[in-house]
Amino acid sequence: MSTERIGLRPRPAAEAIDLGLKLARASWPRLVTVAALAQLPLLALAGIVFLWQPALALLVLLWFQPTVDRPLLHILSRELLGQRIRLRQLIRERQQWWTGMHLASVSLYRFHPARSFTLPIWQLERPTGSARRARTRSLNHGAGGGGVLLSLMASVFELTLIIGLFGLFGWLLPPSTWEGLNAPGWIGPGGIADELWAALILAYAVSAVLVEPFYVGGGFGLYLNQRCRLECWDLEPALRRLADRAAGHKQDQAA
Amino acid sequence: MSVSLAATATIDTRFPVETPDGIELALHPAGPIPRALAWLIDLIIRIGIMIALGTVLSFLGTTGIALLILAWFVVNWWYPVLFEVLSAGATPGKKAFGLRVIHEQGTPVGWGPSIVRNLLRQVDFLPVAYAAGLVSVMCSQRFQRLGDLAAGTLVVYSVPTKTGHSELPEGPIEAPPMAFSPNEQQTLLSFAERSAKLNPDRVGELANLLTPLTGHSGADSAERITAWARWIQGTRQ
């Protein structure tokens, strides 16, 4: 496996996340586009639920974010190998990212605290049953809770962007837009107005489109780092090259 | 079809700089997560200071309130600047996460840049809760918020990654069968050093890659590579 694309070596957990963020950053237009496209069917589903129960629509959108993460990780894993994958190819290779603990990730493991760190094991390595649990445990060794911290901070940053969007529109929209806020009571004894729910859902969708690529990237960075720390994965290509050269060297001597 | 990215630069978290006195340094700029957490700790400390001051100054009536407002100004604006310049580039929050502020050239941060980067916090804070700063940090190559870009400063991990080599365990020393390039020597040294902490199965697996060279397999092969590494280390000293 070639890993020329990124500088791998054992790092502290925080710096490993940074490496993943930079990997995501290097192909952010493609990741954000895919994240936005993947958001569309979820928004459609949320829209249908919205007619019935606005609060539930937000929950639906939030609940299925692990599905959005999958094509993003697929792109990143190819990027690591130095391959830039096109949208058509991504769809053709859907079997590779759609399966692998997908159902579990949106049900039993929806609130797995280190979701994006564990996703590469589920989706790229695909061990099953007890082998999967053993693999997850061993790769977690000495990770220092980096994956959990990443999940926590990704939520904080999503919230930052949601509040930021609300703040921005609060400034930019003419004050008359907000006059209705007092009259029928957007937030009041009657609960939260539908308009506010809709705004919240859209703001969440925007922030998720921007944050998920980096959340997945950070988790992938941690995963790669654990493989370097625990398996000397970063030395493997160099050792292979050395073996190849040694083979050539021997042939030269024989000749 | 997929496009090869071989020509693009390697992605790394390490940035080499040359200091004014001609020394090569590797800087490790810190990403948004430790920085946000450090900010949170500093916020808690500042609130703590204000509560303590408020309790004391409340005995002074209206004068106390006036003093408290002045104190808020000092604590809010000068807390980060004073710590960054006088305490090796780190506020208590940054220190807790092993971060410090430096100039882009790797030198300790001075008064001017520190004041600029902390004044511009107000811009990074826009529209609310540091959304602009977050976007800027993610857009810039070295995780700089707008204040950092204006002041020419970086927030880096202060713990330098180990550059020297740890001691290899005692054992036989053997000259390698062929001449290795500096990169290859480095690989063998890293392997010998890190294999001590590795799962033995994995050590064997990696050592098997060099079986054609060592003439052994598994642990014996690893033992032979370590003997060469000792020899390489000996020639370097």
Image (cartoon, coloured by chain):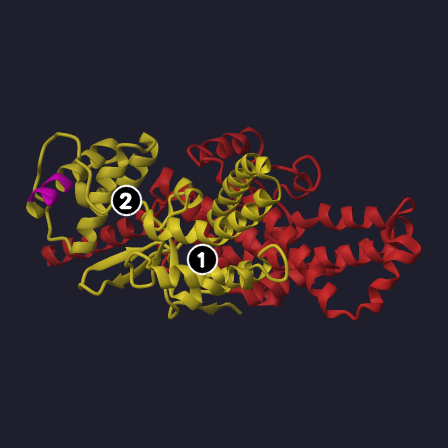
Chain colours: A red, B yellow
Q: Which amino acid type corresponds to the residue marked 1 in the rendered image?
A: Leu
Quadrant in the rendering for residue B169? top left
Foreground of the two, A229 or A147: A147
Chain on which label 2 sits: B
Give residue A12's position: percent from left, percent from top: 38, 43
Q: Is residue B169 left or right of residue B59?
A: left
The answer to whether residue B101 is magenta is no
Residue B165 x %, y %: 19, 42
Q: Which mark is residue B209?
A: 2
Specify the quadrant that holds the C terminus of chain A: bottom left
Query: Which residue is rendered at x = 55% and y = 28% of the image?
Result: A130
Q: Is residue B28 above or below residue A150?
A: below
Boundaries of the magenta span: B229-234
Residue A74 x, y percent position in the rendering: 55, 55
User: Is B232 covered by the magenta stretch?
Assistant: yes
Residue A80 image label: 1
Specify few, some or many for label 2: CA neighbours under 10 Å numbering under 14, 14-19, or 20 or more. Answer: many
Is residue B58 left or right of A168 when viewed as pictured? Answer: left
Which label was assigned to residue B160?
Answer: none
Confirm whether residue A205 shows in the render.
Answer: yes
Q: Main secondary structure of the magenta part?
A: helix
Q: Tell me: B132 left or right of B164.
A: right
Q: Is there CB contact under 8 Å for labels 1 and 2?
A: no
Position of B213 relative to A40 (above/below): above
| Relative depth, front residue between A148 and B63 | B63
